[in-house]
Image (cartoon, coloured by chain):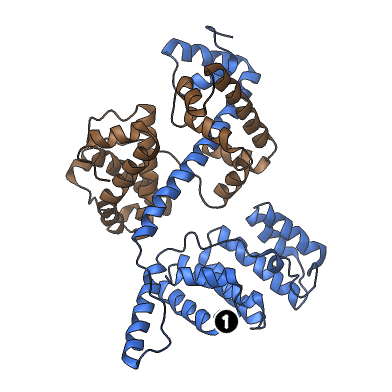
Chain colours: A blue, B brown
């Protein structure tokens, strides 16, 4: 105790800049001499940083909503367009896709777990234990480590290779290596039968990665193709995401 | 909602709740076009401007709560000074600072450097979000009011509907202990926080 304050109160007063000059000097002296106090101070700094992060996240979301409210929605397509109306509509749609694609923030979400584990067709863990270690690193958000482990895995053909590529592409995304992520997602699409759920999701992530890599026009074109070719086969979740990114 | 002066904006922020949200939204909306022009003229994209300006509004809000904004310059100049510092740091980080051309309002160019905070983003933010979401809503509000908005315990006790300050203090202790345990039990979160403190 010092000047009637508990250690915890002193730490808070110090971190909140509420101490007088002499109080602060005394506290710093105590910290230098007392490892337990120093350790408690470091932990409390982390607590404050976490509180600040949480509060900032909410405030940031509120300000982001302000941006979303200003965006221009795309009108739904009519099936009975006369040609010139259709052409104008397509031009407007492409333009709005480009506008919408100026940000993909909020569109990326972790892939559905059935794709992540490659179990859609009843294969519980393609790739065996080695790939399981990669997956575990990914789930622990250790993306660089997951990629490193991936380099040591001797992959069999087929579904395990798809699964490994899928994880690798998401690691690259999280590491913000967007051009490489886009390439990886594109390569994975070539390995996957077009009827598969994985195929559609891979295409979706390819669009997002292209955009983040700065290839806005290419991303817009890919999104339009994904929509035109796969929309009817998509699950509700993916359909909703595609609609949102297209500004519907 | 419209505000006719900086004093009105500050009064809105200080009264908290919806008035505070309206004031911050107003500041964001009114000043974003200027910030957007500045960022896009300096190797940035429109979404960079949105991101940086959102962070700048948050830093400004924190400075008001901490009593660091003294009103010696206009809010607009202060916000622009924060954005400029943030963007210069970003350009330095990307090695693009040679392309920088000052294009702010003259009033903002005269501002001294305004210290700004470092924001957690990307996968690091996801790790922290997962940790903090394990804390109850009441606790999250309480610690936020105390350690982010610098509200006195007496006011917090009233906001929480507690009988007196001591009840709020006891609750604060329990909430802080929960947070400490959450951090101590999540190595990744602890390491990320150590980077940002």
Residue A12 point in image, percent of width and height: 52, 22
Q: Is residue A196 above or below residue B75?
A: below
Q: Compare residues A6 and A160 and report the one nearer the observer.
A: A6
B134 left or right, relative to B147:
right
Q: Is residue B1 above or below residue B13?
A: below
Q: What is the residue that sits farthest to the bottom in this orientation?
A: A83
- The residue lying at 55 percent from left, 73 percent from top is A239
Residue A130 point in image, percent of width and height: 79, 62
Q: Compare residues B60 and A93 and report the one nearer the observer.
A: A93
Q: Compare residues A58 and B51 and report the one nearer the observer.
A: A58
Q: Is residue B64 above or below residue B166?
A: below
Residue corresponding to mark 1? A232
Residue B87 point in image, percent of width and height: 35, 49
Confirm whether residue B95 shows in the render.
no
Task: For mark 1, name the chain.
Answer: A
Residue A136 point in image, percent of width and height: 73, 56
Confirm whether residue B122 shows in the render.
yes
């Amino acid at each position: 105790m010092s000047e009637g304050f508990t250690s915890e109160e002193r730490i808070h007063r110090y971190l909140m800049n509420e101490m007088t000059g002499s109080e602060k000097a005394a506290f710093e002296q105590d910290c230098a001499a007392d490892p337990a106090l120093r350790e408690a101070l470091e932990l409390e700094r982390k607590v404050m940083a976490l509180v600040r992060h949480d509060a900032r996240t909410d405030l940031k979301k509120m300000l982001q909503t302000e941006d979303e409210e200003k965006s221009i929605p795309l009108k739904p397509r009519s099936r009975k367009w006369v040609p010139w109306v259709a052409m104008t509509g397509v031009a407007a749609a492409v333009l709005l896709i480009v506008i919408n694609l100026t940000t993909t923030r909020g569109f990326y979400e972790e892939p559905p777990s059935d794709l992540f584990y490659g179990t859609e067709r009843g294969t519980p863990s393609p790739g065996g234990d080695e790939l399981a270690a990669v997956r575990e690193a990914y789930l622990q958000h250790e993306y660089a480590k997951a990629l490193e482990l991936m380099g040591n895995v001797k992959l069999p053909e087929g579904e395990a290779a798809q699964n490994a590529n899928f994880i690798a592409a998401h690691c690259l995304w999280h590491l913000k290596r967007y051009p490489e992520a886009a390439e990886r997602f594109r390569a994975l699409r070539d390995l996957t039968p077009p009827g598969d759920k994985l195929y559609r999701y891979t295409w979706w992530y390819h669009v997002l990665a292209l955009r983040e890599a700065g290839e806005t026009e290419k991303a817009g074109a890919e999104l339009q193709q994904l929509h035109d070719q796969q929309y009817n086969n998509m699950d509700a979740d993916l359909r909703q995401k595609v609609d949102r990114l297209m500004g519907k | 909602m419209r505000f006719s002066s900086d004093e009105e904006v500050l009064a809105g922020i200080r009264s908290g709740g919806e008035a505070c949200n309206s004031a911050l939204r107003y500041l964001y909306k009114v000043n974003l076009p200027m910030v957007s022009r500045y960022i896009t003229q300096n190797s940035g994209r429109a979404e960079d401007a949105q991101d940086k300006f959102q962070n700048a509004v948050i830093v400004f809000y924190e400075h008001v709560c901490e009593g660091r904004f003294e009103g010696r310059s206009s809010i607009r100049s202060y916000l622009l000074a924060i954005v400029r510092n943030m963007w210069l740091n970003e350009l330095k980080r990307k090695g693009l600072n040679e392309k920088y051309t000052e294009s702010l309002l003259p009033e903002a160019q005269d501002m001294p450097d305004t210290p700004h905070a470092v924001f957690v983003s990307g996968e690091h933010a996801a790790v922290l979000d997962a940790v903090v979401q394990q804390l109850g809503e009441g606790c999250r509000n309480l610690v936020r009011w105390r350690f982010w908005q610098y509200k006195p315990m007496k006011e917090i006790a009233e906001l929480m509907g507690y009988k007196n300050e001591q009840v709020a203090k006891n609750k604060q202790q329990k909430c802080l202990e929960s947070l400490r345990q959450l951090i101590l039990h999540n190595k990744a979160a602890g390491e990320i926080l150590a980077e940002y403190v």
